[in-house]
Amino acid sequence: MKLGFIGCGNMASAIIGGILNKGLAQPEDICASVKTQSSAQKIQNTLGISCTTNNLEVAKTADYLFLAVKPQFCTDVALQIKDALTDKQVIISVIAGKNLEWLKEHLGNDKKIIRTMPNTPALVGEGVTGVCPDNLTSDEDLQNVLTLLRSFGQADIVTEPILDIVGAVSGSSPAFVFMFIEALADGAVAEGMPRKQAYDFAAQAVLGSAKMVLETKKHPGELKDMVCSPAGTTIEGVNTLEKEGMRSAVMDAVRACIQKTRKL
């Protein structure tokens, strides 16, 4: 199985790293393309795979071809590779905002295409990816792609309308979580805690809290109530967050991301 990546930034590198770490492919089975020769050399040195500046070369040789370029570059890339693609290849899009209809129009209606939306925690093997296949993709091909995507975290099938929501609730949200961790640490620093220690405590608290949601399967509100003792310190903090509109601010941020995605 030959894997190709057109675009090899942080996300594609995380995907490749997961695949290699799990032994699902060998470095010689993976080829990527990037804009500059210096970037190609860096990828080769870092990941040990073949890397070129020729998108067409990658498109011709891959059984499973990942498109991992920025949305603004997709039209140019599609024009470059369209005639080199075959109906036997599986094309996996990691491009935000470009739906199956757009991809079919620009790459060919006879092509097997799977839209995906991974997130940056893939860099540490804790990613989550929404997966939306077209009606030409076989069950075998879909299972092969899911296996690749699960090499760096979770991957689940969703409908295409849900995929834009996935981009916000898991794709963009790490930025919101990082802001929250930074704010927690800033509050601790303001009261005298050393900054490095504050980051460590805040980050571990967020990690542990997320793990409780996933492993206990309890409603987040129930878990919150478990921390809030009557007349205690935590409920005072919760009261402040409610006054400041934390919930509505986060909801608005998620919806803003979704609306932006739909305009891409």
Image (cartoon, rainbow, N blue to C red):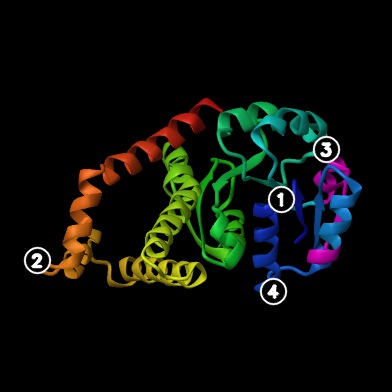
Q: Is residue 227 magenta?
A: no
Q: Is residue 51 magenta?
A: yes
In the image, the segment drawn in magenta is 45-61
Q: Which residue is mark 3?
A: 84
Above or below, comparing residue 232 to residue 236 in the picture: below
Among numbered discs 4 and 1, the one appearing first in the sequence: 1
Among numbered discs 2 and 1, the one appearing first in the sequence: 1
Number of the front mark, 2 or 1: 2
- Which one is nearer the viewer's eye here, 2 or 94? 94
Q: Residue at x 18, y 66 (%)?
A: 233
Q: Which residue is mark 2?
A: 231
Among numbered discs 2 and 4, the one appearing first in the sequence: 4
Label 3 with label 1: CB-CB less than 8 Å: no
Residue 9 is labelled as: 1
Element assignment for label 1: loop
Left or right placement of residue 47 versus residue 218 in this view: right
Compute the Cα span from label 2 to label 3.
68 Å
